[in-house]
Image: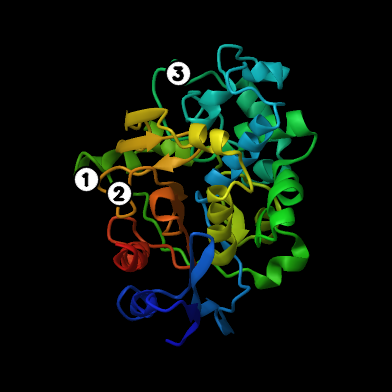
Amino acid sequence: MPVHGTTAPGFERVHEAFAGNFTHCSEIGAAVCAYVDGEKVVDLWGGDAAEGRPWTEDTLQVVFSTTKAITAACALHLVDRGVLDLDAPVTDYWPEFGKPDIPVRWLLTHQAGLAALDTPVTPAEAVAWQPMIAALEAQRPLWEPGTESGYHAHTFGFLVGEVVRRVSGRSLGTYLREEITGPLGLDFRIGLPVAEHRRAARIVSPKIDLSVDPATLPEALRPYFDPTSLTMRASMAVTPFLDHNDPAQLAAEFPSSNGTGTARGLAGFYAALLDGRILSPGTLALATAEQVSGVDKVLRVPVRIGLGFGLPTPDLFWHSPGAFGFSGYGGSLGFADPARGLAFGYVMNHVQDPVSDRRAANLVEAVLEVLS
């Protein structure tokens, strides 16, 4: 499979790893970009964006939960401006939220207890935004807020997004475009304009068989196939499952999952964080300091969380003291490693099993070989 783009001298190994993903890891279409100390050292793309359409340097890709860090940055940008207080009750900004004991901070750390809905919303209701907001206003916390962290797979983006909307008067996608990605020239959006849909790669997802009897599975996997578990209820807060290939969903704002951009735009976001063009050094330090650690109540795995940013656990291939970022369903990844001056972005359209998927790891390990 031809690989296009450039690598700086010394980073040729990353080109080899990227090409190897197509040969050995069932890659279909993808791009990877990395900056070191603000200089672009890797910018590669290749494969197919859709049947009969090659991936080009400006192909856009939905990155699923990798979006969450960019959503968090919008809220933190308001903190930097002094108009949003992390320790104020959410109800100070959103009175109808109705849960005065939950501060803004707990929305960013997945501690609000609102990971699932007693009555899930439909995709059309999620597209409309307000029905999801009404559902969150009515929802009782599923555990005592602040006592535990449980991954808010869908609801995170609506919770944080509504606070951003109440404070700024703009939707989160609009705020992102007008205050962050637009001024910085970053090719990344939450809510893709219809005129840009022609640039978007088509997601290729495996068919998931949910008819498996959980009792036949290893205990660690059972919650992922039990519709009554908090794990599955969180993933089904929107039912049926969202389809980000759908034009209406691609154009809507889902600040948990439908951020759409290039690898260059994703890596550029983290490069801009590192050099202080998005957040002040003090706010970035606060955002990337550990707020929560332990076994996640929803995911059932060990996690470390900052203010909207994921922090790596020792078993992750991008683990480094001080690193921060977020990965997405199926394989995408964006992160920064301040100690190395590294900002990294990888996007792809072939959703794979996270247990066996080595694509991002192959690329990160190749970059770190050069920097070690």
Secondary structure beneath dot 2 equals loop
Q: Which label's residue is closer to the chain start, 3 or 2? A: 3
The numbered dot on residue 171 is: none
Please report contact status of discs 1 and 2: CB closer than 8 Å, yes or no. yes
Q: Residue at x 66, y 60 (%)?
A: 186
Q: Which residue is mark 3?
A: 146
- Of residue 197 and residue 358, the one placed in the foreground of this image is 358
Visible residue check, residue 344: yes
The vertical placement of 23 against 78, above or below, is: below
Secondary structure beneath dot 1 equals loop
Residue 323: image location, x then y, percent: 40, 46
Q: Amino acid at mark 2?
A: Val
How much space separates mark 3 and mark 1, taking CA atoms?
A: 32 Å
Quarter placement of the C terminus: bottom left
Residue 56: image location, x then y, percent: 59, 79
Q: Which residue is mark 2?
A: 212
Q: Which residue is mark 1?
A: 217
Quarter placement of the N terminus: bottom left
Q: Nearer the viewer, mark 1 or mark 2?
A: 1
Q: Residues within 10 Å of mark 2 (few under 14, many from 20)?
A: few
Q: Residue at x 45, y 63 (%)?
A: 205
**Number of marks:** 3
Q: Amino acid at mark 3?
A: Gly
